[in-house]
Amino acid sequence: MAVAPRADPAEFFSADEWRELTARSRWRGLWLVAHCWGVIGLAMLVGTLWPVTLPLAVMVIGTRQLGLFILMHDAAHGLLHPNRRLNDAVARWFCSSSLGEYRPYHLQHHRYVQQAEDPDLGLSAPFPIARASLKRKLLRDLTGQTFYKQRLAPLFAAATKRSKLRADSQELVRGWRFVIGNALGFAVFAIAGLSWTWVLLWLLPMATWLPLVTRIRNIAEHALVGRDQPDPLRQARTTQAHLIERALLAPYWVNYHLEHHLFTQVPCWKLPQAHALLRMRGVTARMEVQPGYATVLQLAAPG
């Protein structure tokens, strides 16, 4: 298995620029985790006090739930904090408890991106698809069908097919961890007389908006990117995102996905700086960059 060709940072940046781009911060990653939870808490408060804002609150919270995963992803690369133990502890306790399983899976994705050994290849391989097919997928996301299939169906299947229990043990552990964690969260809010807040402003975003933005993110990152791509500048996609897209679809600079693949040791908050330097040197003209998420979806489902 040959690894995917990689970019040499020295071809694009000076030694001082590379040192600045890859410098670990002792506070920035922790601040982003706190910011993410702060936005979630504020949106839950606003949605509770003014129920008319519930639709917007669901979108904001669902996007920040994706944000927690994005920050856990940075931690998988050891970028959230220079102290590795603190990096992992913060990610496990405040972003996602699945860090241990995710890290080797994700590093394999980087090693073999868009090759047969890439574990994420199935997310991009089906595209382009018919527009009607994409609409059905997005509808399943928004109506909770994707959430049920991914989160709850494995638990019900295991309960009826005990012979699969051992084979699916890791998936079941994740499933029960999810159920128990949310049951505890519901209990805490119920004691405070706010059980409906947990259901409508935590579980509902997770069951609807989060699957939707996760699907759009996956499409934008690698759909229609060539298999076995020899040019590192064409192995993933960067999507330009305006303010509303960053707030409701692509938090914490996740849209700079090609820069992340090119330079995996650059923290998420430095990716815009890397992109600006590449643009200044005319490199972005050779990169897979699209002007917005609507454009990417039109390419992925042309008709």
Image: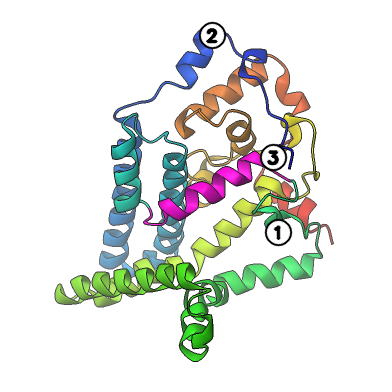
Dot label at residue 15 = 2
* Secondary structure of the residue carrying numbered label 3: loop
Q: Quadrant of residue 1?
A: top right
Point out the image quarter for the C terminus: bottom right
Q: Residues within 10 Å of mark 1 (few under 14, many from 20)?
A: few
At 74% from the left edge and 38% from the top edge, which residue is drawn?
Answer: 2
Label 1 sits on what residue type?
A: Gly
Which residue is farthest bottom? 160
Dot label at residue 146 = none
Label 2 sits on what residue type?
A: Ala
In front of the other: 156 or 28: 156
* Secondary structure of the residue carrying numbered label 2: helix
Q: Percent from the top left, x then y, of residue 105?
A: 55, 51
Q: Residues within 10 Å of mark 2 (few under 14, many from 20)?
A: few
Queried whether the magenta region covers residue 132, the answer comes back as no
Q: Which residues are magenta?
A: 96-114
